Image (cartoon, rainbow, N blue to C red):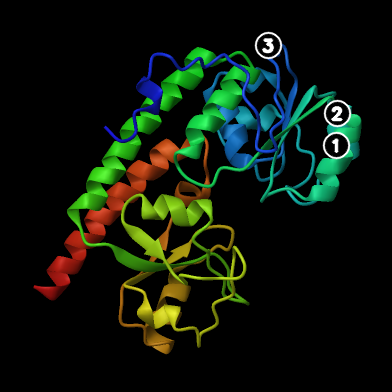
Amino acid sequence: MPFDFAMRPHVDLMKPIPDALGVVHRPFATARIACLVPSITETLFALGLGEQVVARTGFCIHPEPAIRDVPKVGGTKDVNVAKLIATEPTHVIVNIDENTKPTVDHLRRVIPHVIVTHPITPEDNFTLYRLLGATFCRGDAAQALCEKLSAALVTAQQTAAQFPVESVLYAIWKDPWMSVSRDTYVSQILAAVGWKTLPIQASKRYPEVPETDSSWREADRVFLASEPYSFGDEHVALLKNEWQLKQPVALIDGEMVSWYGVRAIEGLLYLAALRRYSATASRQLTS
């Protein structure tokens, strides 16, 4: 079984492990946690740590309605450090992609513990669960998430094996049009069900893809994400009617694809179901 990490009995989920920068965070059962990463805020609640989350960004919107009681301290890129400090956190959780280095450097000077995260693949969520579980003394809850993720990865792998690999262009922004490179979490989770993103090579992790870019015509299908840009039916119509794209163009739930942590479990199952549905729909159109 390829994804058996969670099943190995010798794994100690309470053993301190390093964060994305190699910093080891010792167990701290009574931590006061400020989280500047929406998907990780959701994960903290899933681990039973909701009452210890003392600050969040305005983009940390899950889980409802419990999240409403947590004070907002700005956005992921424009954190109000004064408001954050006022919540008296012992720990702040940040992400290399989502938060700015100047903000994180500032927080290191005023907050005792800054935990840096950077999942790139769906499998990296195992490490994320372990890191949070060990640091905040939620080993059993982390183990449960590991087991659910392992099962979801198997479902994704089995789904990918049923169909030929397809190339997809996954649009995340408009004006300018932007997509994702293959070294991003979004690209890696799509690959888990057999969808390989275009462009194949890119100098930036989130490259611009103007209308003239060959990826639009080379892709087997095009996805328009619901976040960070809120694509809608009018954008599907633009690509089909004005750009005259011949391949399928569809809206896709951006949270299911780009949110790691606990959402990765549901996201993998969502993508596996979408892959099966898309394959069936394509067969019906060509039959």
Q: Quadrant of the N terminus?
A: top left
Q: Residues within 10 Å of mark 2 (few under 14, many from 20)?
A: some
* In contact (CB < 8 Å): disc 1 and disc 2: yes
Q: Residues within 10 Å of mark 3 (few under 14, many from 20)?
A: few
Q: Which mark is residue 69?
A: none
Q: Position of residue 86 (x, y in %)?
A: 89, 28
Q: Residue at x 33, y 42 (%)?
A: 269
> Which residue is labeled 2 in the image?
111
Q: Are marks 1 and 3 in contact (CB under 8 Å)?
A: no
What residue is disc 1 on?
107
Find the distance from the CA under tag 1 to the CA under tag 3.
21 Å
Image-based side of 228 in relation to 287, left or right: right
Amino acid on which disc 2 is placed: Ile
Q: Position of residue 46 (x, y in %)?
A: 52, 25
- Type of amino acid at the residue the image marks with label 1: Leu
Amino acid type indicated by mark 3:
Ala
